[in-house]
Image (spheres, coloured by chain):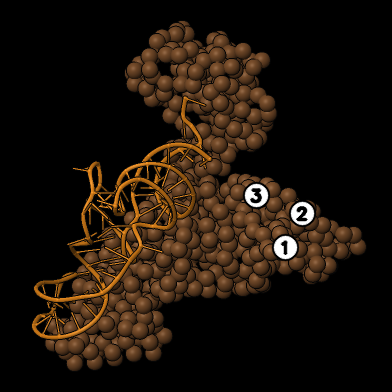
Amino acid sequence: MRASQFYIATLKEAPAEADVTSQKLMLRSGMIKKLSSGIYSWLPLGLVTLRKTEQIVREEMDRAGALEVIMPPVQPAELWQETGRWDKFGPQLLKIRDRHERDFLFGPTHEEPVTDIARKELRSYRQLPVNFYQIQTKFRDEIRPRFGVLRAREFSMKDAYSFDADEAGMLRSYQKMFDAYVRIFTRLGLKFRPVAADTGEIGGLASHEFQVLADSGEDQIAYSNASEYAANIEQAEALAPASPRAAPTEPMRKNPTPGTSTCEGVARLWNEPLSRTVKAILLYANHRVHMLLIRGDHTLNEVKTGKVHGLKGWRWASDEEILAAADGPAGYLGPVGLDRSKITVVADRTVAAMSDFICGANEKDFHIRGVNWGRDCPEPDIVADIRNVIPGDPSPDGKGTLAIVRGIEVGHVFALGRRYSEAMGATFTAEDGTAKPFEMGCYGIGVTRIVGAAIEQNHDDKGIIWPDPMAPFTVAVIPMGANKSEAVKEAAEKLYAGLLAAGIEAFIDDRGERPGVMLADQELVGIPHRVVIGERGLKEGVVEYQHRRDAEATKVPLAQAAAFVKERLAR
RNA sequence: CGGGGUGUAGCGCAGCCUGGUAGCGCACUUGCUUUGGGAGCAAGUUGUCGGGGGUUCGAAUCCCUCCACCCCGACCA
């Protein structure tokens, strides 16, 4: 591509609304343009990368035996009423009406239409397994869109849906998609990790997320230093302490802690380690207030909490409910002296094994120390794993300890089962002649999100550093002073032509800009390889090659430049 | 959904308090010079000051209202 025939619209300053690196760089480099909150246009430069990403996804889906389809983004409400999601999906679902006042929606996902296809088209077990996929624009009316294309309302997604005759087949289809995802992210040149994930609202038997590792990621991933174990922190199990609860050594005593409502504050006030304190969190579930207890230096895991018996669908307790059930204000709560007919005590596994701990006294401005289960208050009603794991915790698989990194979720595979096929009466005739519901799996990749995540993972203070497979152009040829020197111009054009002939996606900056402008643009836009051609070098018969990550340029004889670049690309 | 903030040229911003000819930097156009790290000089172009209503001789500025966008929060007691 010639710069003069392309649309390069780089900005020195990013629009004020950009808050994360990838969004700033995408706006500054002219990849995208915001139209409305969470809604972006893709300009030529951005689209090249988006299409390349899409193409790798498509090739690997095809290779895995999935069949491409296109389903309508606009879907009739009736379909979603069949599965109950018309009401249950919540405000993220963009509902629209046509001129006849009929309800429609703009698809946030496509389980319903694809299941509708299956029930109409697939009749026999002999037609199975089948996997349909599409790459298409989705719309989810996010509460708060942010981070540019990382959490947009409108975004491009690859969604695939497998249909099998039985569970074993479904798990085989699941594994195929898992393997395809590994190939996709490997080919894209990204550092990533598949992690065990919560099956969440969609439900199902198994689920893995594919996380692109980046410090700015919103998700936390816990992984073992000694095994393949990796899980989203939402899901990672915190094992019960290996050693049993120690015997009490201190008397229980209540002391004033005026104006000190946090564990951190009390620990500082009494010069005790934070790990001896216990914090109480009050929830409301199943018409009852629950007091959850976790160690002061731990944090509550909301997902695991929802899985505790009796806590499904919990919400935070109101101040009135807290006062009525615990007889004390938030900030000074604990398990001592509670009326257990009014409140259920749920202790984290770690807390259940603590002795001589510190907690609130259920009285404003007072805490208690030296508290022991059994002696000072009844044992917890429920002991459960309700905290987030922290670095250094033992790995749940018994091998090694956990570390935590941040990631951006770019893919998710679900072994769904029969949830949608049963709800929508999607059946096939099995070998024994009976009608059976399909065993389904669903598999998503956020294609537009991959682009943002790749930038979060690969950039420096000058701009984007694309992995070769995602780069809009792989090599930039930059002539210095081409309008002054015929020799420079000729050498640059010849190299450009040579690279193209070798099948390399080359870019030549023939705009006649000053050197600083051309170099700054190449760096901002993130073209990973560049060859600078100037009179200075030509006198010695050399050009300068530099990878975007190289600290310095390498001098290469002009005649060997194309071959040199080709060799670098093969790495 | 709650709280805070911002809307002025394509982008970044000043002007608003204290009403009186709409400004600056970048970008863009033209010319000359310059050409190995976002050039210099000169001359230009670009505005429904978010929309509507009101107060006033006069409103970007004060008042009312609507809209859009951004940030924080949705709990960690």
Quarter holding the C terminus of chain A is bottom left
Residue A407, percent from left and from top: 46, 52
What residue would you read off at disc 1?
Answer: A100
Per the image, label 2 sits on a secondary structure element best described as helix
What residue would you read off at disc 2?
Answer: A82
Q: Place residue A468 in its image quadrant.
A: bottom left
- In the image as oriented, which residue stretches furthest toward the right? A433
Q: Which residue does the image show at 40% across and 73% down from the upper left?
A: A45
Q: Kindly indicate whether the residue at mark 3 contacts the one at mark 1 (C-beta within 8 angstroms).
A: no
Residue A37, percent from left and from top: 47, 56
* Residue type (three-letter) at the residue carrying disc 1: His
What hue does chain A carry in this figure?
A: brown
- Residue A332 visible, this orientation: yes
Let me know if marks 3 and 2 both belong to one chain.
yes
Per the image, label 1 sits on a secondary structure element best described as loop
Q: Kindly indicate whether the residue at mark 1 contacts the one at mark 2 (C-beta within 8 angstroms).
A: no
What hue does chain B carry in this figure?
A: orange
Residue density around tag 1, few if under 14, some if 14–19, many if 20 or more, within 10 Å: few
What residue would you read off at disc 3?
Answer: A89
In 3D space, how far apart are the residues under numbered discs 2 and 1 (Cα atoms)? 21 Å
